[in-house]
Amino acid sequence: MMKLSELTPPIVIAHRGFKMKYPENTMASFEAAIGAGVKMIELDVTLSRDRRIIVIHDDTLDRTTNGTGRASDYSLSELKALDAGSWFDPSFKDERLPALEEVIDAFGNQVTLNIEIKESAHEPSGPPDAIEKQVIDLVLEKKLLDSVLFSSFDQRILARIRELSSQAHLSFLTEIPPYEGILGILRKISAFSWNPDYRTLLYSHIQKIHYAGFRVIPFTINDKTIVKKFLEAGIHGFFTDDPILQS
Ligand code: G3P
Ligand code: CA
């Protein structure tokens, strides 16, 4: 088992696996990223119609599978029948949408995982099987709490996970330019890091957030020169579609 506390910066996070060369969020993509040497893989989760946790980035199936419509309108077994690889290249026609548990079982003891809970899956009514509850229960059941970074653009999801576990590692994602409220949110949820879109990130913000005691891990950088500049400015790690970017 690899723990977050054992990772030394810079943490290179494989965004949806080895997204540049493999169909995103598939077992092939995660396996390739791990083969490339990363210590953390990132993936996106939402709920199927039968409330199983599935790994897919978009709310809809159209871009990354041969299905159509919303993923949440289909059961896990219906989703499993879809081809999640041919859209990228016909050689990946056997790739399927993974259930989160499959990814955890296959890779959870080899690398750390960054599980992004999509904001569209959030249910304000907070049912007992809400996605954030299911995800934390699964990670606890697999005894991988120290190996998982939970992230979301939705601070309500992160606040709920914090209620459910005082030990969970949380990252707040932002894609709009930073604002004054960020620090308050990071403090409220006792965040592991702030993960902003690098295109909105200023050096002054890195300094400010560091000074307050939080890590900064921007997404998604595929340019070596930009990585170098931000590393010099003090980021703790970065997301990339190309996990061999630095070699
Ligand atoms: O967690 C970083 C990044 O994955 C967030 O953006 O749209 O790729 O899920 P997105
Ligand atoms: Ca993501």
Image (cartoon, helix red, strand yellow):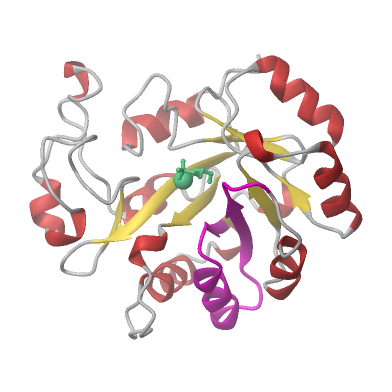
Residue 66 at x, y percent in the picture: 11, 35
Instruction: Residue at 71% x, 24% y: name it.
Output: 227
Residue 153 at x, y percent in the picture: 52, 57
Residue 57 at x, y percent in the picture: 35, 45
The quadrant of the rendering that contains the C terminus is top right
Above or below 189: residue 199: above
Instruction: Residue at 31% x, 47% y: name it.
Output: 56
Instruction: Residue at 64% x, 63% y: name it.
Output: 169
The residue at the far right in this view is 211
Image quadrant where residue 37 sits: top right
Q: Residue 159 in magenta?
A: yes
Above or below 142: residue 220: above
Image quadrant where residue 83 sits: top left
Q: Residue 240 in magenta?
A: no
Q: How many marks?
A: 0
**Magenta region:** 149-177
Above or below 245: residue 239: below
Residue 97 at x, y percent in the picture: 23, 44
Above or below 57: residue 13: above
115 left or right of 90 in image: right
220 left or right of 194 in image: left
Of 84 and 197, which appears nearest the observer?
A: 197
Instruction: Residue at 33% x, 85% y: name it.
Output: 127
143 left or right of 131 in image: right
